[in-house]
Image: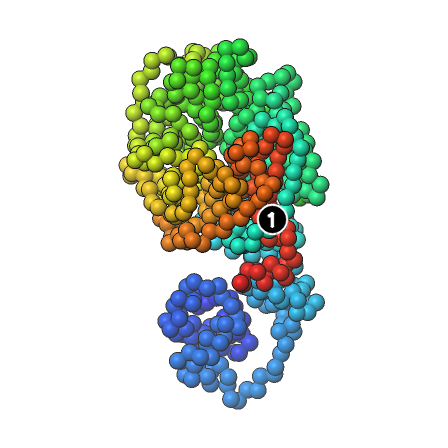
């Protein structure tokens, strides 16, 4: 074992005991041989590792080296160690231990609130997540208190989602009768609400007092904003994304359909930050019919349509190059009604119908005449198709995808099963579908869902709610929790589709649930941080 690979915490022990780095490498190698599972899986804990060293079969061999008989070491208190050593040790603690030492003395309480400690906690938490997490601002912009809240909010959201406690941690209701569509920006802080005249309001759900602020105000009345899709710009240091606005219906009597693209950016910092929007592109599209769903990826905008003749098709625009006079787009004619669409990183399109998945190529043609599709189209053959053998895929049952170097991953609910779908980046490899979880007692047609990468919310007609959780491995699926472990809670005042509400929105990072009803918007938080003190949250996490 190279001395360069020795954990820093063990180096400190060596320094305190007078142990050379070479001798320490022998000792660490012995420990890892006898307790490989401990060393490989668990984070380094100084006290635990030292206990292991003292009970190691090779302890006697190194006893005289660790405790030379000719040297009488003075006893020191932990708090008398140099500050940099104390910080390095505290950085190795998990979040529970950091909160625990906060209660021991003022010195360690101050240490536990330092930025270096919570930067370490942030990096550890992000590294443990299967799907990517993004800050709204650069890491160096966050104070120690802001990083602590960011980390503990998400940890408490995981704890709250798994809790069997039926209490709501926090709930907000906003009276807003003219809302036509809602969209929750990933991260759970910003809720966008579309209105009948084309206006978009922004709610800061982390604010002490939540009030809507106009984000987009069209100069002339436009179509109602029903669908919103976004594509995040990861090259920007602050939260920045492209936003598309779309109605749900286009008739002969209504004004020409407008494709409306905006750039939204976070300005300011922390609690004083707000979103601003600037127009990027507006052009006309003369399609007639109903819009089923929209999706965005970079300069690509997709929307599923169904015209008055019952023909279903998908338009894919290169919105940056399209104008009201000529479109740059591709049109796909599936042989089924499409409920949801998602772009893959290479520009291919995943289409979800009531009974199957299909992947289509996106071959963009430039300079196309601005007209509606032909009345009798030729069916587009997919690159790949997976039938579900008659098991209905519910509307709202397909998650957004997340990607790594190997594949893009989706979660879908069909019947009583939750599936994981992985689509390899290589077009030569076939997508893979695997079963994640079986859910007992579901009645298709009587439930609504919000499906995400590791969490699922299921609402029943009797207003009981299932909160499901499962996990993925990097290139497959870990053993999912059995379906008997999900939490069931009844919220009497929580709106469902049975009383005029739309499909729920779920942010799995923060455990925040959004529902739009006839008379307004309901926001429900499940994170324990909103209900309990840090001490109580730490206690609940160990139960």
Residue at screen point 29% across, 39% down = 429
Seen as rendered, the residue at the extreme front is 462
In the rendered view, would you say 482 is above or below 197? below
Mark 1 surroundings within 10 Å by alpha-carbon count, few (fewer than 14), some (14 through 19), many (20 or more): some
Label 1 belongs to which residue? 168
x and y, in percent, of residue 26 in the image: 40, 74
Residue at screen point 68% across, 63% down = 110
Name the one closer to the observer, 24 or 204. 204
Residue at screen point 54% across, 63% down = 542
Residue 303: quadrant of the picture: top left
* Quadrant that contains the N terminus: bottom left
x and y, in percent, of residue 466 in the image: 49, 46
In the rendered view, would you say 237 is above or below 146? above
Colour mode of the rendering: rainbow
x and y, in percent, of residue 40 in the image: 41, 64
Q: Is residue 159 left or right of residue 79?
A: left
């Amino acid at each position: 074992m190279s001395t360069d690979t020795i954990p820093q915490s063990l180096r400190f022990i060596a320094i305190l005991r007078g142990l050379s780095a070479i001798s320490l490498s022998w000792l660490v190698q012995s420990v890892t041989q006898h307790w490989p599972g401990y060393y490989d899986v668990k984070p380094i804990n100084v006290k635990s590792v030292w206990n292991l060293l003292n009970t190691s079969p090779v302890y006697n061999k190194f006893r005289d080296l660790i405790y030379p008989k000719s040297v009488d070491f003075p006893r020191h208190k932990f708090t008398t160690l140099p500050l940099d050593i104390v910080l390095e040790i505290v950085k190795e603690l998990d979040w529970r231990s950091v909160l625990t030492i906060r209660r021991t003395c003022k010195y360690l309480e101050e240490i536990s609130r330092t930025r270096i400690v919570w930067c370490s906690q942030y990096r550890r938490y992000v590294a443990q997540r299967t799907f990517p997490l993004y800050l709204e601002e650069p890491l160096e912009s966050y104070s120690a208190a802001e990083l602590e809240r960011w980390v503990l909010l998400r940890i408490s959201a995981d704890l709250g989602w798994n809790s069997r406690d039926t209490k709501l941690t926090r709930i907000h209701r906003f009276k807003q009768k003219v809302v036509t569509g809602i969209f929750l920006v990933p991260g759970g802080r910003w809720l966008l609400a579309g209105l009948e005249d084309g206006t978009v309001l922004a709610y800061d759900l982390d604010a002490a007092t939540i009030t809507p602020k106009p984000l987009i105000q069209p100069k002339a009345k436009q179509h109602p904003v029903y669908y919103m899709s976004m594509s995040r710009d990861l090259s920007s240091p602050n939260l920045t994304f492209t936003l598309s606005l779309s109605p749900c219906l286009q008739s002969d009597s209504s004004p020409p359909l407008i494709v409306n693209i905006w750039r939204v950016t976070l300005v300011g910092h922390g609690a004083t930050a707000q979103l601003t929007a600037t127009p990027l592109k507006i052009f006309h599209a003369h399609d007639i019919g109903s819009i089923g769903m929209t999706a965005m990826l970079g300069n690509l905008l997709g929307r599923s349509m169904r015209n008055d003749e019952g023909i279903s098709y998908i338009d894919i625009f290169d919105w940056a190059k399209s104008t009201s006079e000529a479109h740059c787009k591709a049109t796909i004619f599936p042989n089924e009604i499409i409920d949801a669409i998602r772009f893959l990183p290479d520009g291919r399109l995943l289409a979800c119908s009531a009974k199957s998945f299909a992947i289509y190529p996106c071959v963009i043609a430039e300079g196309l005449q601005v007209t509606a599709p032909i009345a009798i189209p030729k069916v587009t053959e997919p690159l790949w198709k997976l039938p579900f053998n008659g098991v209905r895929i519910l509307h709202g049952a397909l998650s957004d995808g997340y990607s790594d170097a190997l594949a893009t991953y989706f979660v879908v609910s069909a019947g009583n099963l939750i599936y994981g779908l992985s689509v390899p980046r290589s077009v030569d490899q076939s997508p893979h579908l695997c079963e994640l979880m079986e859910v007992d007692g579901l009645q298709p047609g009587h439930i609504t869902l919000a499906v995400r990468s590791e969490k699922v919310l299921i609402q029943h007609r009797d207003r009981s709610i299932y909160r499901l959780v499962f996990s993925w491995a990097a290139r497959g699926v870990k053993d999912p929790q059995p379906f008997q472990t999900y939490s069931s809670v009844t919220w009497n005042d929580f709106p469902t589709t049975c009383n005029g509400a739309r499909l729920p929105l779920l942010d799995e990072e923060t455990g925040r649930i959004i529902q739009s009803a006839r008379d307004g918007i309901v926001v429900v938080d499940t994170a324990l941080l909103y209900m309990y003190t840090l001490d109580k949250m730490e206690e609940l996490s160990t139960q």
